[in-house]
């Protein structure tokens, strides 16, 4: 059934993509545009309380669109121009398929999977609606549901598991990555296309804190923003499509995470620049008025889904973690005080100027790359270029993001987490990856402009200045292709390594003692975890809540040595999960209950524990 569901989902995806082609969407943007259209449709159904029906309607619509396209194509009423397969297509298909297989076999490990991202997908899948006030299993109720909706759609037809969720998010990421090739001037040039493939592979180096085997959306924000900016550039001569593109991508980004507002601002600035640069025969005042109305109108349409979400959160929940609220920010600032602000600021500056920081290394590497590229192309190739200007804008983006990130630590994060700059490298990786993509796109276009033959129709293997430049081009293309493959394989092997390394972690161990629960409940469950840090950070509790689909799971690492206290503590719960042996708990059970306990899942009785299932 899962295979049939996968085919059904794939046909729907192809149907939306082919429809986007018919609507004159760039071929390299059709996949991600089709996915975002589905997300928006699912969002409307979810907000109206019809999510379960919406899953079938939206997916079936894609299949219907595909059938219509095939029927009309057969009668010659609809025709599409296909460029054929290029070198980068083979790279994307082959390595993407391998990566998807690896992710399908990957467990979820990262803390935030269980505190929100995987839990919300499980909730949507098995309840069929958005969380309400009584659904306390969802803590971060202000987080928008865009990626969760798409992942839910995928697992609805392919089966719910860690692997299928990861594959769904990878489909979204890979579709957005494919959009980078829309910016190429000449897609037949292997050097340029492989440079972009190498950029995709290198971007995972700066995403190494979470990798692709997690459902966190930091990388998703970067890759969607890149696709949005690429579309604005590609659609400069198609103002209506450009307008719809900006509205769709801006709206989708805002529904991925609240912090996406920063990246939507980048899209808005570039869109305004694009509108101003468009030639017009009208009077300057009419042009300015048209630009302002178009710009504001487009962004307002893009913001409407998020505004709807904010209204929904305000009306549904009295309080919500990480919500956008001036009152919450004021309270946080007054609570920490000036001393707290200064302490966090000092730690922030220390992290930024540390050469051991991965984000700082990425910032410096990009600067060196673009400065070196500018110098070589200008002085060795005698071709003036705007790489330094682009670098200036990218550094400004980094600087502004530093300030916004500092504001988040000061205004919306508890002091204990803020003073340690919790998640700093993960948050900064989004901007580093985005700047890397933008820099690579501009660099590749500048390289293309330095080629001997500028007429794309005249380019052929014979069009080189000399035999030396031809040999140099071929050697460079081969080396770039080699490193693009090696770097992507490095990510694949790295994911495999982390999967093997995590075989003895709590999320994997718990799967050996019990099957996951899929019906939302309020059962009180105690999970025994000998690792105190996992209990103190609520990692064990969040994991148990996700796995057993309850909000009453608790992790515990130490137990009282007094009989009364030990028994009273245990009798609070209905079930006890023991993923791995714990000396304190085992000793207490043997002493006070006269019962030997091995890893397994137990039901709490009045005077003993009854084994429900044991470790496999």
Image (cartoon, rainbow, N blue to C red):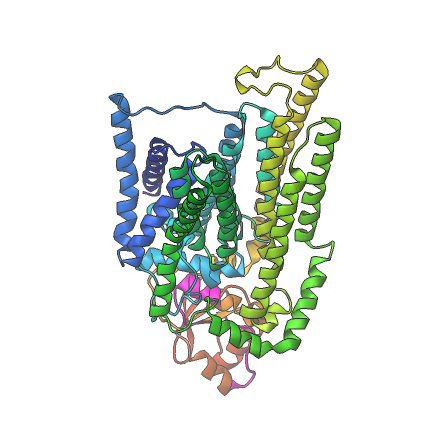
Residue 443 drawn at (x, y percent): 63, 35
Q: Position of residue 384 (x, y in %)?
A: 68, 31
| Residue farthest top in this picture | 462
The residue at 64%/72% (across/down) is 341
Instruction: Please indicate whether residue 450 sits to the left or right of residue 275 in the image.
Output: right
Could you say which quadrant of the image residue 127 lies in? bottom left
The image shows residue 600, relative to residue 170, as above or below, that is below
Above/below status of 306 relative to 81: below
**Horizontal relation, residue 370 to residue 134: left or right:** right
108 horizontally vs 425: left or right: left
**Residue 4 lies in quadrant:** top left
Relative placement, left or right, of 110 versus 3 is right
Identify which residue, 127 or 193, lies in the foreground.
Answer: 193
Residue 128: where, in percent of width, then height? 30, 57
Task: Please indicate, yes or no, whether residue 24 appears anywhere in the rendered image.
Answer: yes
Is residue 489 visible to us here?
Answer: no
**Residue name at image x 66 percent, y 77 percent:** 339
Q: Magenta stretch containing residue 232, yes or no?
A: no
Question: Where is residue 343, by image quadrant?
Answer: bottom right
Q: Residue at x 42, y 60 (%)?
A: 119
Residue 570: where, in percent of width, then height?
Answer: 46, 78
- The magenta stretch is 542-563
Q: Is residue 554 magenta?
A: yes
For the image, the number of numbered tags is: 0
Q: Quadrant of the N terminus?
A: top left
115, 182: nearer the viewer: 182
Residue at the image position 64 percent from the left and 30 percent from the top: 480
């Amino acid at each position: 059934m899962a295979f049939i569901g996968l085919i059904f989902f794939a046909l729907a995806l192809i149907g939306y993509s082919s429809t986007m082609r018919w609507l004159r969407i760039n071929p390299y943007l059709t996949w991600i545009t089709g996915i975002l259209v589905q997300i928006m449709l699912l969002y409307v159904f979810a907000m109206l309380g019809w999510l379960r029906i919406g899953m079938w309607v939206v997916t079936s619509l894609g299949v219907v669109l595909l059938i219509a396209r095939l029927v009309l194509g057969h009668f010659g009423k609809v025709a599409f121009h296909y460029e054929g397969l290029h070198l980068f297509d083979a790279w994307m298909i082959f390595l993407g398929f391998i990566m998807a297989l690896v992710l399908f076999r990957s467990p979820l490990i990262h803390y935030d999977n269980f505190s929100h991202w995987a839990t919300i997908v499980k909730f949507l899948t098995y309840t069929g609606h958005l969380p309400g006030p009584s659904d306390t299993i969802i803590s971060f109720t202000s987080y928008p549901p865009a990626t969760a909706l798409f992942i839910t759609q995928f697992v609805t037809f392919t089966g719910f598991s860690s692997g299928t969720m990861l594959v769904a998010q990878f489909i979204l990421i890979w579709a957005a990555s494919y959009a980078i090739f829309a910016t190429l001037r000449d897609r037949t040039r292997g050097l340029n296309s492989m440079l972009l493939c190498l950029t995709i592979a290198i971007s995972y180096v700066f995403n190494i804190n979470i990798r692709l085997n997690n459902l966190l959306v930091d990388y998703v924000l970067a890759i969607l923003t890149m696709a949005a900016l690429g579309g604005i550039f590609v659609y400069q001569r198609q103002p209506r499509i450009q307008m719809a593109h900006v509205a769709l991508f801006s709206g989708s980004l805002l529904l991925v995470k609240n912090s996406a507002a920063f990246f939507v601002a980048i899209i808005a600035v570039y869109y305004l620049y694009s509108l101003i640069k468009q030639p017009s025969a009208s009077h300057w005042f009419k042009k300015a008025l048209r630009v302002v109305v178009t710009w504001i109108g487009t962004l307002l349409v893009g913001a409407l889904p998020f505004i709807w979400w904010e209204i929904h959160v305000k009306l549904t929940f009295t309080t919500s973690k990480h919500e956008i609220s001036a009152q919450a920010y004021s309270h946080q600032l007054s609570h920490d005080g000036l001393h707290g602000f200064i302490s966090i600021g000092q730690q922030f500056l220390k992290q930024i100027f540390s050469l051991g920081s991965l984000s700082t290394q990425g910032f410096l590497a990009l600067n060196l790359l673009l400065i070196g590229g500018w110098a070589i192309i200008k002085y060795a190739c005698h071709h003036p270029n705007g790489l330094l200007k682009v670098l200036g804008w990218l550094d400004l983006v980094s600087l502004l993001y530093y300030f916004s990130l500092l504001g988040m630590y000061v205004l919306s994060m508890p002091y204990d987490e803020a003073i340690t700059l919790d998640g700093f490298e993960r948050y900064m990786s989004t901007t580093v990856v985005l700047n890397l993509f933008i820099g690579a796109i501009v660099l590749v276009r500048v390289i293309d402009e330095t080629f001997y033959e500028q007429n794309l129709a005249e380019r052929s293997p014979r069009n080189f200045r000399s035999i030396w430049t031809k040999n140099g081009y071929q050697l460079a293309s081969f080396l770039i292709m080699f490193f693009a493959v090696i770097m992507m394989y490095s990510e694949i092997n790295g994911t495999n390594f982390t999967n093997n390394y995590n075989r003895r972690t709590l999320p994997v161990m718990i799967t050996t003692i019990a099957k996951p629960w899929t019906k939302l409940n309020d059962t009180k469950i105690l999970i025994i975890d000998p690792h105190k840090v996992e209990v103190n950070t609520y990692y064990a509790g969040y994991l148990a809540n996700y796995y057993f689909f309850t909000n009453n799971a608790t992790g515990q690492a130490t137990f009282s040595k007094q009989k009364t206290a030990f028994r009273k503590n245990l009798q609070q719960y209905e079930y006890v999960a023991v993923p791995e042996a714990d000396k304190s708990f085992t000793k207490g059970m043997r002493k006070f209950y006269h019962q030997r306990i091995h890893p397994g899942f137990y039901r709490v009785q009045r005077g003993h524990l009854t084994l429900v299932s044991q470790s496999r």
